Image: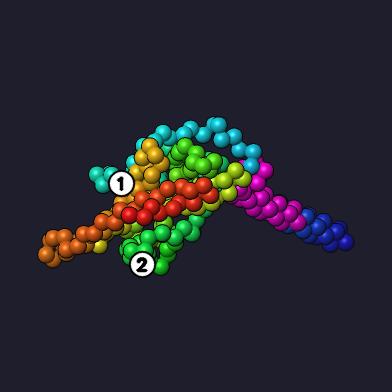
Amino acid sequence: MVIETKKMIKNEAYNLIIFFTSTLFLISCKMSKDNEKKLVQAPSVESIQAFNWDTVSIKKLPYTYSYDYNNDFLFALTDSLKQKNEISEKSELNFLFSDKTEFKLKEDLYAKEEDSYPYKGKGYFYKRFPDKNKYKVLLFIYSNKEQDYYLPYFELQTINSNNKTVDKLIVVGGKNYECGWDRSFEIDKDYTITTIDEQSCYDIEEEKEIERVIYTNKYKIDTQGYFKKIKK
């Protein structure tokens, strides 16, 4: 009888240990999932609506940007800018980025031929330019990891008074391969936006360039916040 009682106590103690262990495991899993949600949780609409734009410095015009091909880490440009604190994972303005942007050009660019285009994902706030026609003008950067040989993209996006995206324009992009594509841009003091696309192909066997074309397009931001192409 004593032996059976001891066995019962032992079994109950064992069951209690299993119960508490399982409970602690479930609690820790829930806490882990809750923490994951907190890490990826975007700011509330109210916090973005109340964002203080006076704290964001404005880059004066004129402004130009093109890839520095002497940079050995050009494909890791976003990581480099993070290290220099020029972009930040924690910037509230990152959440204003709008993805799935299409090119506005009628000409066929090599970038259009990729299956993983247009890009779907997050971008990083990089620069703010002077407001135009009461719209804020932001420059974002992102890397499409699914596109082989492609360099990071830069996009201009116009934002209205409700902090909603109105229009978008890819102003910098590139494909570094046998047949390459490169886009640079500039904004003059009159707020004319110029994009310059250069495409070229290189014959490895012949060791020479066999094609080079250049497209130049100009845009203005209209009174509704849209990028309008200027007719030549």
Query: What residue is drawn where x is 66% and y is 50%?
Result: 34
The outermost residue toward the front is: 232
- The secondary structure type at the circle numbered 1 is loop
- The secondary structure type at the circle numbered 2 is helix
> Is 137 in front, or is 29?
137
Mark 1 lies on residue: 67
Identify the amino acid type marked 1.
Tyr
- In the image, 231: left or right of 2? left
Viewer can see residue 75: no
Magenta stretch, main secondary structure class: helix
Query: What residue is drawn where x is 44% and y is 41%?
Result: 126
Mark 2 lies on residue: 113
The outermost residue toward the right is: 1
- In the image, 23: left or right of 91? right
Q: Which image quarter is the N terminus in?
A: bottom right
Position in image of residue 123 (x %, y %): 48, 49
Position in image of residue 188 (x %, y %): 36, 40
First to last magenta residue range: 19-48
Identify the amino acid type marked 2.
Glu
Label 1 crowd (10 A; few <14 / some 14-19 / many >=20): some
Query: What residue is drawn where x is 85% and y is 59%?
Result: 5
Q: Which image quarter is the C terminus in?
A: bottom left
> Is 7 in front, or is 90?
90
Looking at the image, tell me whether mark 1 or mark 2 is earlier in sequence order: 1
